[in-house]
Image (cartoon, rainbow, N blue to C red):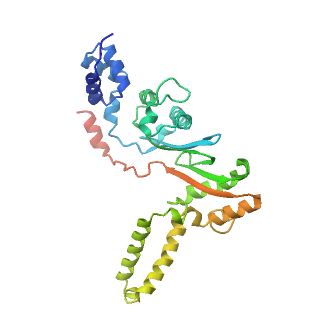
Amino acid sequence: MANVTVAQIKELMTATGVGMMDCKKALVEAEGDMEKAVTLLREKGLATQAKKSGRVAAEGICTSVVKGNVGAVVEVNIETDFAANNDEFKAFVAAVADTVIEQDPADVEALKACKISGGDKSVEEALQDLFIKIRENMVIRRFKRLEGILVPYVHGGGSIGVMVKLDSDLPAEKVFEVGKNCALQVAAMNPSYLNKEAVPAEVLDGEKKVLLAQMAEDPKMANKPEQVKVKIVEGKVGKYYSENCLLEQTFVRSDVFDGTVGKYVADAAKQLGGSITVAEFVRFERGEGVEKKEDNFADEVASMIK
């Protein structure tokens, strides 16, 4: 077996964009021959991942999974919605969520180094193996792990993944329906914050400055006394809360309760004879914030045949 140096592995990783373990294996198999190692990686379909890594992965799956009192919301991206419907890709995403639950990694890089749930390889190695089959760039984008009374919800086959955490002195099964309705609210209305107290002071200050600036530009409002403007701004801040804070939002399931989400939870707790508090929520939307690259098909074909 050839002695492979760290410098050689790094050089091969830079040249191909392939992960460390695969580069090390290729160099060992090639007895340290760099060109032969590159060829081996290309033959295995790994080196093409470097070329594909520039392609935007904005499709994929957001999932939300709970096991006992531990749960995970995970987003894994891939290039096309067609590939996102591949059963092996779906199984990989499910295994990644299980890995987060079982091993509690600190971040995505730590997650990639974990042994994947139900397998004998690392998450990164399993991803590379899947790439060979699917041939599309894949990215484990983000995850959040929670513990407690958890209620998961997945919308649209993985377009949105939500998890709601409740604090309650009631059994989990009794408050599940409350958590599910709150999760539906989060999915539908996309609140930015849990409640008024969670809104950062700088966000509120910025919102007030915008509102005051708008009034200064409005001829009908510009000459009003300053104290009147302040009161108007305070009223509009209340609207900001009702649009952006989960517990201040109007409950979307008007067939169940007419009022805010906060009042719905309080009313449900009273009927069940205990206390229920929404402690936290997580909402991932597939491709959220990812800038999709618009490719010219003719230019792409031309570049492939050069």
Image-based side of 126 in relation to 179, left or right = left
| Residue farthest along the front direction in this orientation | 169
Where, quadrant-wise, is the C terminus in this rendering? top left
Instruction: Work out whether residue 121 can be spotted.
Output: yes
Residue 121, given in percent of the width and then of the height, sits at 48, 24
Image-based side of 298 in relation to 255, left or right = left
Image-based side of 59 in relation to 153, left or right = left
Residue 11, given in percent of the width and then of the height, sits at 25, 26
Residue 194 picture quarter: bottom right
Residue 141 picture quarter: top left
Residue 110, given in percent of the width and then of the height, sits at 44, 35
Instruction: Tell me: residue 217, above or below residue 199.
Output: below
Q: Residue at x 57, y 57 (%)?
A: 186
Image-based side of 36 in relation to 251, left or right = left
Where, quadrant-wise, is the N terminus in this rendering? top left
Q: Residue at x 41, y 36 (%)?
A: 109
Instruction: Tell me: residue 134, above or below residue 246.
Output: above
Q: Residue at x 54, y 45 (%)?
A: 158
In-front residue for pair 39/268: 268
